[in-house]
Amino acid sequence: MNHQDNRPIRLGVVGAGRGRSYMNVSEAVGFELVAICDTWEEKLERVGRELNVTTYNDYDRFLQHDTDAVVLCNFFHQHAPFAEKAFSAGKHVMSECAACHTLAEGVSLARAVERSGKIYMFAENYPYSAYNQEMRRRYQAGEIGDFKYGEGEYVHPDPAEVKLARSCGWDHWRNWIPSTYYCTHSIAPVMYITDTRPVKVNGFVVPYDTDDPTQTRHAKRSDTCAIIICRMDNEAVMKSLHGALRGHGNYVRIHGNKGLMENCRHGDKGRLRIWREPWEKETDQPTEEVYKPGFAVAADLATKTGHGGGDFFTSYHFAQAIRTGEQPYLDVYRGIDMSIVGILAWQSALNDSAPIKVPDFRSEQIRKQYENDDWSPDPERKREGQPPSSILGEIDLPTEAKDLAREIWAKQGYAVDI
């Protein structure tokens, strides 16, 4: 299954927008970019000319190109079917989040990876920031004891105009995806640092805010933010916070029974803080350490890429996995674990935040129980029994939001009739 080391890994990328990050670092980690695919033809052709690679607006034809691996940067809720097609075509796959949009897709994806014998890398980039990699190193060395409580935050507010420019079309996924679903940026670092997985979730949401212009002037029909409480497989508790609250930032906090680790909330947020109680630390240990960690490998390349170096390291580990034939740490099972937490948290939120067990799709016996579970708020899958996008039910967009959306989308080259 491993790749021949004497030639580059031929790579195709789906998504001429977000995919640029992976195209830009491909050569540095041992890929040769040979093809790209997108349905937005104007953007596709422009990027294709810039990079001098073959372009496709049809995914099936793209998969016929002579590639070893593909990176999926298509829409959030469409990754699993694209990944399965790539496996059927004999390709290794790196998929952006989410790994799957329904529990049935998670079952099918896990089976497809096992059947293919190919590498699957979940391209969740936030674990690979320098401070998260350092926290993993120090946690695994036992420096703060056993994991007891953790927090992950991904808070990302933007003006309505900015959000509209990246969500063209009334039914673009960003305009209807429930607030619990976009959870992997906050959950993944805690799982990565502590090597634990969620086994039970409670979901909570802060409803759509009719007094917030970043929401009422936008085309989205989902809620302000989500809080997910997870019981982990070692009995620890994790809190995930993500959404459009004011106070942009990414934070991770890990409490062990011998100390605390977190990135700083003021000043340079890339700094790491380690705390030990003065009455139980070793004599030669400081009570508090605050410092800015660097990358242990490829620092010069990683610091030039997006998401705090995360876009480099996902590609780096994908290439390493292909060359060795060994699945990466962020394999299909961890990708599914992180992704279905958002689905189950939405079920919980709609049921007065009741706890819901997280199935482990490493087990075929468990998978069989969920193989037909296609519960989804996707407007294209609407039917009796499917959930709304907001805890409030269906959100009617204000006239101002519709007018602004048409204006912004027209500037992006995307016209709508209604």
Image (cartoon, rainbow, N blue to C red):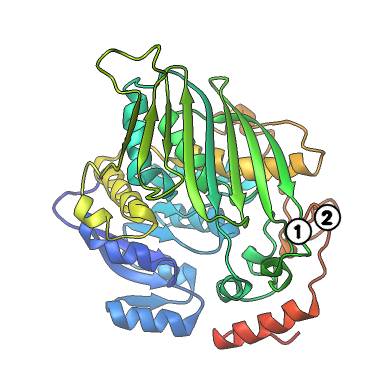
The quadrant the C terminus occupies is bottom right
**Quadrant in which residue 104 is drawn:** top right
Residue 95 badge:
none
Whether residue 60 is visible to the viewer of this picture, yes or no, is: yes
Dot 1 amino acid type: Tyr
Q: Residue at x 70, y 74 (%)?
A: 217
Q: Residue at x 28, y 19 (%)?
A: 285
Of callouts 1 and 2, which one flags the residue occurring earlier in the amino acid sequence?
A: 1
**Quadrant in which residue 20 is drawn:** bottom left
Q: Which residue is mark 1?
A: 208
Dot 2 amino acid type: Leu
Which one is in front, 218 or 366? 218
Q: Is residue 76 left or right of residue 3?
A: right
Disc 2 crowd, CA 10 A, few/some/many (<14, 14-19, 20+): few
Q: Is residue 278 above or below residue 22?
A: above
Residue 54: percent from the left, percent from the top?
33, 76
Q: Residue at x 72, y 59 (%)?
A: 222
Tag 1 secondary structure:
loop
